[in-house]
Image (cartoon, helix red, strand yellow):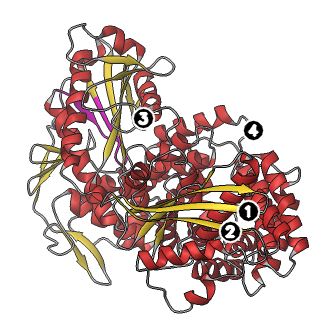
Amino acid sequence: MNYQFDNCVLDVDRRELRRGTTLISVEPQVFDLILYLVENRDRVVTKDDLISAVWGGRIVSESALTTRINAARTAIGDSGKSQRLIRTLPRKGIRFVGEVSEDRSGLKQSESASSSQPSVVVRAEAHASCVLMGEDEGAARSALYNSRGLVISNLEGRGARIIPTPADTVIAVFTDVTAGVSAAGDTRDALLELNRNLPADSRVHYRFGVASGDLHEGAEGPGGQPVERAAALVLRGHPNAIRLSESVHAALPTDLPFATMKAELNDYELAGGDVSAPPKGFPVQLQSLDLALPNRPSIVLLPFKSLGDDQEEGGALAEGLRIDIQNALIKMSGVFLLAAGSANAMRSWTAMDAGARAGVRYVLEGGVQQSGDQVRVNAQLTDTIAGTVLWSERYDRVLDLNFALQDEITARIVTTLDVKLASGEQARIWHKCLTDPEAREFFCRGVQAFFRMNAESMANARACFARVADLVPDSPYGATWVALCLWFESTRGWAADPAQAREQAGIWAERAAAMDDADGQAHTVLGNVRLLQGRFEEALVTAREALVIRPNCSNANGFLANVLLYCGEPQKAISHAKRAIRYMPVYPPWFVEILAAAYRDAGLLDLAIIAAREVPRVAPSTIPGRLILASALVRSGWLADARRVVGDAHVLDANLTLGRWTVSQPYRNADVLAGIIVDLRKSGVPE
């Protein structure tokens, strides 16, 4: 059964929408919405009608409903402004007003050939920085729509049969290995050419996986060995990579105009297209990450080097000095500051490489040489766009009560970059330095241990910061960093008793946040402790206070996004999660988990799927990211994909149950949590 209207054909049996000769990719719910409107075109359809027919009566937000209607209009070439085909009647509902003709002969094509030989499946999935940190969801969707259209057009033009799939995913079926691999290579090259002419925040990269075997297509989507294998290949590939299964590689003719190379496990990778795998140890998060320069002075402080014979002593002072400068700059709204954690991943990079990879203009480098209480510090600020050193200075100082070199260097940066300080920032920035030499030494050692980020080093860091708190009880330094250590120990499973560690983190954070010179880090911890205690209003107030003090802070934005998500403000959570990721491009996976969950709760399921799929690539053993992905896939109508994802989660954690997961979710609105539980139950998570 086909419905024809305007220049569109809606094929009910194949669940396909074509506009002219182009196959239009639509999510299952959008397809169902269009079909329901067309079938009921003789009347006005109410909101309740749509929720009942398309969502099965489940609770749906206004934003989710509006998003789906807009997507339906876009898919059929309509818009909210023209309303040629789908018309809104204020306070009544919507109605399909286009002229429709019915064709019961269908557009079925013979697929008998596919059963006589193995299918070759090309699976492509997008990697888009605009989804993770772009400011405009509409622009991100437009970029994804254009790139996906190019992928489909290229593959289809080379003889592929396109199978409807969720979000950005494209699954193309070929009957010949050579044709499938060649089409993937040509499509990858076409995308690279497209991206060369686009601004950074509009580029979309694709990963490709090519596998062969018997394909099965059912009501819940495509399945079978080649689909499973291609999905695994895509997961392991870097952006722009084309991964080949062993069987595909073995079937390639030797004269194919593409070279291959052995990759990990039983994978092979297709060369060509001026694409090479990133060097070993290169952060996964930075692979093909397209970062536009911020619209304010942007800077990264690379880890200072220890230049003396005593690397341990000099290294601790170098790290402490850099973090002190970082903590001053982070309070300035007029400058964009890359997070210290991401800067650590660039420890051995040149200034020019760091600026280009991190998407910032200015790079501060430094070296520290210490001998007893004598210290020499070299600092250099580079403009990576102009390729010039703005200033280079050597400081000789004594480590005594008057040591405040961090303030001198911070002031020099502010002056050089002409940073404008907002109201109130002047008083916050020039904080009370640790003048007690012993406290300063323990603080520097603690910072050095903290950034090693393992159970033993975190316990050592906590002991150092506790000593700082004893030596200078009126300073927030010790209490703040003890709270941070306890929080990480509780959330990363390093504490013998995570609940007790979390409680202690709250006590130390409350103590630090109450001090006049609090730097905001304690507020980030305290806000999330209050969230887990169910004190939602306090959590929101405290997390927002952290951002007022630390507008440039990735953690302040990320922790606030977490609180907003669970308190029922997903749209605001999206905004702050994106800022957290941009400030920390070598981001922790939980930043993207928050973003994906917020996209899902806001009804932006296509973006939720794309974001959630990034989490296992950064943290292959993650469970939360997979469950968020499964939930979004269920809501998009892709049960087979959701069950595959949950199957992977069960392999990682055989004890995964709904009961265990539910107790870790502090949602303020029980209905939101109940909806997610329904999703996970459908995807196969046991009770």
Mark 3, Cα crowd under 10 Å, few <14 / some 14-19 / many 20+, is some
SS of the residue under disc 2:
strand
Mark 1, Cα crowd under 10 Å, few <14 / some 14-19 / many 20+, is few
Q: CA distance from mark 3 to mark 1?
A: 42 Å
Residue 395: image x %, image y %? 60, 67
Q: Which mark is residue 655?
A: 4
SS of the residue under disc 4:
loop
Q: Which mark is residue 278?
A: 3
Q: Earlier in the sequence, mark 2 or mark 3?
A: 3
Q: At 45% from the left edge and 74% from the top edge, which residue is drawn?
A: 335
Name the mark nearer the viewer: 4 or 3: 3
- Above or below for 500 versus 103: below
Q: CA distance from mark 2 to mark 3?
A: 42 Å
Residue beneath disc 1: 374
Name the mark nearer the viewer: 4 or 2: 2
Q: Are marks 4 and 2 in contact (CB under 8 Å)?
A: no
Name the mark nearer the viewer: 1 or 4: 1
